[in-house]
Image (tube, rainbow, N blue to C red):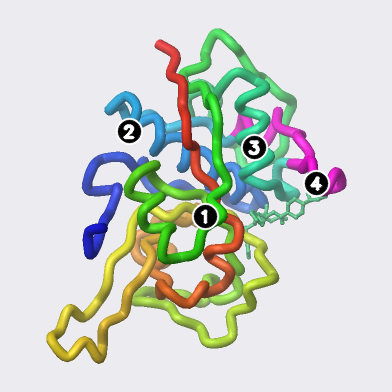
Amino acid sequence: LPESFDWRDQGAVTEVKDQGACGSCWAFSTTGAVEGSNFIATGKLISLSEQQLVDCDHVCDPVDPLSCDSGCNGGLMTNAYEYIKQAGGLEKEADYKYTAQDGKCKFDSNKLVVKVANFTEVPVDEAQMGAYLVNYGPLAVGINAAFMQTYIGGVSCPLICSKRNIDHGVLIVGYGARGFTPVRLSYKPYWIIKNSWGKSWGEEGYYKLCRGYGECGISTMVSSVAAIAVID
Ligand SMILES: CCC[C@@H](/C=C/S(=O)(=O)c1ccccc1)NC(=O)[C@H](Cc1ccccc1)NC(=O)N1CCC(N2CCOCC2)CC1
């Protein structure tokens, strides 16, 4: 496994987006994972529609039927993958634009560009997450975002970030480690996380979270688009 890896260097990640005043983080995490897998499968980077998920995806979690995807009121990436499989795929961002509010479903099956054949939940520990990332592409993860609101840059490693209150969906696009020094005292491995709160948040929209401690529950709800069938 390489010491550091970043899917942005391969051109597999679209620009940082902004969900606005709408609890649709789950939809951005999902499109990010599908955009990455689609790039790996086709070499083409296509920005995909979160609004289609916000308006049209009301899939419920099979385990917890009360937890259904509900647009600006929250959702789960694993439910969203199921929706994409059932709906037949996703439209481009340009064809189904983001409005940051719940709307009537305007799905047009003639405009599908990407079809998800299958997805996997990644039940591994943080050490193996790097291998999944390198092999399958960016990972959609749930995280406790308590310390993200005050984040302004650098490697965040909050000591008391609960692993249980997972409340935000984001995308791991890579990993690295600050401080490659012989003494390795300041060696701080981190995950490179794409957020959906605009480019002015964090480091141009990105969050660096320390790696190896299961920080903020980063390794508890991990999923990736294992198999993607492409249209066009
Ligand atoms: C109101 C939902 C807010 C939204 C994210 C908003 S946010 O703006 O990114 C943000 C997050 C944290 C701090 C501040 C701001 N969070 C979610 O959608 C998170 C994302 C997530 C959590 C756990 C694992 C994976 C992904 N999902 C959730 O919070 N849930 C899934 C849907 C569920 N509902 C059940 C009843 O019907 C309505 C929906 C509620 C729990």
For the residue marked with disc 4, what is the amino acid? Val
Q: Is residue 53 magenta?
A: yes
The quarter of the rendered structure image containing the N terminus is: bottom left
For the residue marked with disc 2, what is the amino acid? Ile
x then y, percent, for residue 79: 68, 39
> Picture quarter containing residue 216?
bottom right
The label nearer to you, 2 versus 4, is: 4
Regarding mark 1 in the picture, which secondary structure is present there? Answer: strand
The label nearer to you, 2 versus 1, is: 2
- Disc 2 and disc 1 in contact, CB within 8 angstroms: no
Which residue matches tag 1? 170
Label 3, label 4: how far apart the Cα atoms are: 14 Å
Badge 3: residue crowd in 10 Å (few <14, some 14–19, many ≥20): many
Q: Is mark 4 within 8 Å of ligand 1?
A: no
Residue 107 in sight: yes
Quarter of image, ligand 1: bottom right
In the displayed structure, 220 sits above or below 20; it is below
Regarding mark 4 in the picture, which secondary structure is present there? Answer: loop
Label 1, label 4: how far apart the Cα atoms are: 22 Å
Residue at image coords 42%, 35%? 35
| Magenta span | 51-70
Near-viewer residue (91 or 22): 91
x then y, percent, for residue 176: 28, 66
Residue 200 in sight: no
For the residue marked with disc 3, what is the amino acid? Ala
Q: Which mark is residue 40?
A: 2
Residue at image coords 31%, 80%? 188
Regarding mark 3 in the picture, which secondary structure is present there? Answer: helix
